[in-house]
Amino acid sequence: MIRLEHVNKYYGQGATRFHVLHDINLQVAAGELMAIIGESGSGKSTLINIIGFLDDDFEGNYFYNDQAIHDYTRADFAKLRNQHVGFVFQNFKLIRDISIAENVILPLLYAGVGRRQAKKTAARVLSRVGLGGYDDKLPTELSGGQQQRVSIARAIIANPDFLIADEPTGALDTKTSQEIMDLFKQLNQTQHTTIIMVTHDPRVAEQCERVVKIIDGRIVDDRKVGAN
């Protein structure tokens, strides 16, 4: 599905240019549950910004479903992002003063789906993530783990080709973190959702099928772990 070849990323210009990613070569197959692990500042967030079509300013080649996209325009990248990828963030990024259902349907509304149909779909997806009947609640009425489930529902409602989860358990306690990991594994195993997860927590990474380790902008390890 995803193939990066000799990708380099720089910030700044001239003498102040900083080399963030060094000659990244990476492939992600459809249906994988993969963790990208590294300390803060290692370059893992920069890498997923490129993978998730958030950053089009890089050197090297990017093939998506065998289509060369590295020369696409920013508008092309935005279209790819809206149509093919869902995002889950550490801090949930929910709109606090609208209902859970209204948060979840946003990707469908952007895609032109009618509100009535979108809300029916949201109800089904919320049930899938264990929040059936929570449609009218506000984010502030939910626990952190429940809010993360809402953000996962929002990420999957438009049936994206893959999910990017950026430190999805970073703001949660150990028990809740495991519940969220179990949900990701369920989505991967039953819905065959491709998931690329960024984490600094080895306990989270080891529950994925594959772990890619990045240090100082370089991939230093890429190994299969096995489904758990």
Image (cartoon, helix red, strand yellow):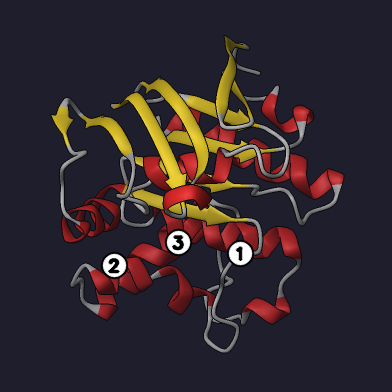
Asked if residue 210 shows in the view, the reply is no
Crowd rating for badge 1 (residues with CA inside 10 Å; few <14, some 14–19, many 20+): many
Seen from the viewer's position, the closer of residues 97 and 44 is: 44
User: In the rendering, at what x and y percent does residue 110 appear?
Assistant: 26, 72
Q: Amino acid at mark 1?
A: Phe
Q: Report which residue position mark 3 lands on.
A: 154
Q: Residue at x 29, y 53 (%)?
A: 81
Secondary-structure class at tag 1: loop
Q: Report which residue position mark 1 lands on.
A: 92
Q: Quick one: which residue is furthest to the front in this view?
A: 15
Give the mark, 2 or 1, whose residue is nearer the N terminus: 1
Q: Residue at x 46, y 30 (%)?
A: 190
**Dots 2, 1 in contact, CB < 8 A:** no
For the residues labelled 2 and 1, the Cα–Cα distance comes to 18 Å
Position of 226 with respect to 86 (left or right) is right
Q: Is residue 108 above or below residue 178?
A: below
For the residues labelled 2 and 3, the Cα–Cα distance comes to 9 Å
Give the mark, 2 or 3, whose residue is nearer the N terminus: 2
Position of 155 with respect to 59 (left or right) is right
Q: Nearer the viewer, mark 3 or mark 1?
A: 1
Q: Amino acid at mark 2?
A: Leu
- On the image, which quarter does residue 218 sit in? top right
User: In the rendering, at what x and y percent does residue 108 appear?
Assistant: 29, 67
Q: Report which residue position mark 2 lands on.
A: 108
Crowd rating for badge 3 (residues with CA inside 10 Å; few <14, some 14–19, many 20+): many
Q: Residue at x 58, y 10 (%)?
A: 223
Asked if residue 31 shows in the view, the reply is yes
Q: Quadrant of the C terminus?
A: top right
Q: Residue at x 44, y 79 (%)?
A: 102
Q: Nearer the viewer, mark 2 or mark 1?
A: 1
Q: Amino acid at mark 3?
A: Arg
Secondary-structure class at tag 2: helix
